[in-house]
Image (tube, helix red, strand yellow):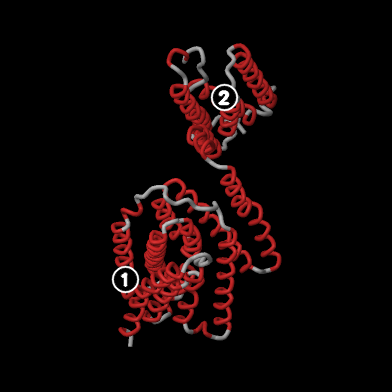
């Protein structure tokens, strides 16, 4: 409310607040108008620009400023200026009348179809209204979101033209799993106290999401895209990623290529997981523990990071020819419900096993917890060990963390989708898992013998 007391400091504050609101409203409209101006230049032929021009930078900026000023007066001068409370309805009615008249001229007289511009004009006005009543962040965010949506028109059109109906259904199915089923299961788990049920659901949903990601990247970039998906997916959840990759590789027709690709992608997933887990462990130890424990862990964890990076560099080098074969892989289905269900069952079984072992009194043996916890989730186990590492013997802390990474490497064989794979493929998968698990296993053994 505007103060009626003459106060230089208060008056200066009111003026500054007024300017902030008006400038925010103006810039929000200008940002939207800038995109509209650019779209006009890129889509209209030069000789027709003047006849078919649409509102641009100045027009949208003024519309937003009109909304900001109207809402400011209506909110701040209500009760002090007669008719201030009726200004907003009048302003909105005036804008709607103007938009209707403009739409009539363009659609009837000039025969220019499309309704986007008229909707954007109303949104620009609302951006100004938000700024005028003091919602600065909301106004700025809305203007950015509107501009982003408008700028995505060309990519969205190309995507709509290239996407298949089954792919659209797959996207909607995954969205339904996250946005509809997810809240229901969360509510049910909260009511019943079954928090583990929600964790199993999240793992299932993550496998589906990574399966869809693998499909999209493989469809767009072939085998190279599948390798990119393996790297990015392993940064999120390597257990979910191995199930998606092992299912996608089955679509490769050439047997030798399928074997080689499965081994290489499995190695990428495990190496990325080991490097990621080591980095998380270093950060967690830096936060939770003493300098002595941290310095003792640096040698092992940095060594594991360097070895993982070296393996990834080697794989990218020797596999460059295969990764450049383009779109020779066609993934059969955008998502695989069976793979997600089997991975979720494996996750549930391993989680149950970990809880049983802990309930039997083994929780005092932190190294054993590291071994068992890594089978389920290396990140959670590492963070748990690091959080109590300040009261542990440094050797026990190091061994526990390395044990979690060791078993997190071995557990890939449980999460892989082995159905339909030949003996050669299963053999390569198992050998790759065991070979790469030996790396953190060797560091764990070194830590153990050095502590004797």
Between 106 and 323, the one lying in front of the other is 323
Element assignment for label 2: helix
Kindly report the distance in space between the C-alpha atoms of the residues bearing marks 1 and 2.
58 Å
Q: Can residue 11 be seen in this view?
A: no
Judge the density around disc 2: few (<14), some (14-19), many (≥20) Cα neighbours within 10 Å: some
Residue 22 vertical position relative to residue 101 in the rendered view, above or below: below
Residue 198 vertical position relative to residue 82 in the rendered view, above or below: below
- Write the residue at 46% across / 81% down: 366
Judge the density around disc 1: few (<14), some (14-19), many (≥20) Cα neighbours within 10 Å: some
Horizontally, residue 226 falls left or right of residue 376, namely left
Element assignment for label 1: helix
- Write the residue at 51% across / 28% down: 29
Residue highlighted by disc 2: 117
Residue 297 vertical position relative to residue 235 in the rendered view, above or below: below
User: Viewer-nearest of labels 1 and 2?
Assistant: 2
Residue 331 location, x and y as percent? 50, 52
Residue highlighted by disc 1: 298
Q: Earlier in the sequence, mark 1 or mark 2?
A: 2
Residue 226 location, x and y as percent? 43, 54
Between 137 and 218, the one lying in front of the other is 218
Between 129 and 319, the one lying in front of the other is 319
Horizontally, residue 295 falls left or right of residue 205, namely left
Between 234 and 412, the one lying in front of the other is 412
Horizontally, residue 172 falls left or right of residue 294, namely right
> Which label sits on residue 107?
none
Residue 170 location, x and y as percent? 59, 49
């Amino acid at each position: 409310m505007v103060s009626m007391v003459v106060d230089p400091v208060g008056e200066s504050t009111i003026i500054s607040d007024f300017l902030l609101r008006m400038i925010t409203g103006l810039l929000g409209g200008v940002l939207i108008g800038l995109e509209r101006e650019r779209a006009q230049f890129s889509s209209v032929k030069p000789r027709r620009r003047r006849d078919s021009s649409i509102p641009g930078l100045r027009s949208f900026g003024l519309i937003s400023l009109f909304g900001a000023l109207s809402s400011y007066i209506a909110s701040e001068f209500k009760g002090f200026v007669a008719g201030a409370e009726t200004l907003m309805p009048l302003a909105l009615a005036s804008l709607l009348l103007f938009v209707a008249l403009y739409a009539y001229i363009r659609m009837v007289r000039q025969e220019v179809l499309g309704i986007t511009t008229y909707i954007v004009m109303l949104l620009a006005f609302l951006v100004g209204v938000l700024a005028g009543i003091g919602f600065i962040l909301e106004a700025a965010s809305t203007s950015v979101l509107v501009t982003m949506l408008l700028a995505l028109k060309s990519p969205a059109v190309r995507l709509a033209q290239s996407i298949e109906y089954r792919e659209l259904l797959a996207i909607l199915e995954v969205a339904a799993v996250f946005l509809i089923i997810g809240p229901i299961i969360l509510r049910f788990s909260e009511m019943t106290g079954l928090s583990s049920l929600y964790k199993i659901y999240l793992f299932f949903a993550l496998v589906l999401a990574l399966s869809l990601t693998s499909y999209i990247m493989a469809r767009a970039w072939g085998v190279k895209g599948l390798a990119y998906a393996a790297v990015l997916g392993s940064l999120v959840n390597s257990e979910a990623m191995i199930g998606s990759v092992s299912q996608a590789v089955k679509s490769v027709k050439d047997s030798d290529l399928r074997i080689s690709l499965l081994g290489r992608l499995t190695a990428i997933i495990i190496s990325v997981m080991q490097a990621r887990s080591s980095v998380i462990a270093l950060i967690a130890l830096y936060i939770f523990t003493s300098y002595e424990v941290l310095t003792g862990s640096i040698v092992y964890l940095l060594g594991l990071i360097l070895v993982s990076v070296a393996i990834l560099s080697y794989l990218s080098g020797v596999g460059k020819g295969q990764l450049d074969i383009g779109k020779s892989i066609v993934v059969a289905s955008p998502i695989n419900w069976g793979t997600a269900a089997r991975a979720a069952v494996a996750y549930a079984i391993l989680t149950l096993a970990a809880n049983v072992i802990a309930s039997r009194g083994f929780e005092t043996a932190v190294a054993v917890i590291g071994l068992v916890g890594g089978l389920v989730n290396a990140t959670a186990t590492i963070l748990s060990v690091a959080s109590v590492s300040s009261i542990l013997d440094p050797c026990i802390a190091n061994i526990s963390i390395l044990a979690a990474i060791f078993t997190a490497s071995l557990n890939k064989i449980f999460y892989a989708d082995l159905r339909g794979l030949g003996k050669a493929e299963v053999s390569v998968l198992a050998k790759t898992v065991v070979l790469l698990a030996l790396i953190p296993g060797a560091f764990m053994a070194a830590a153990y013998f050095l502590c004797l």
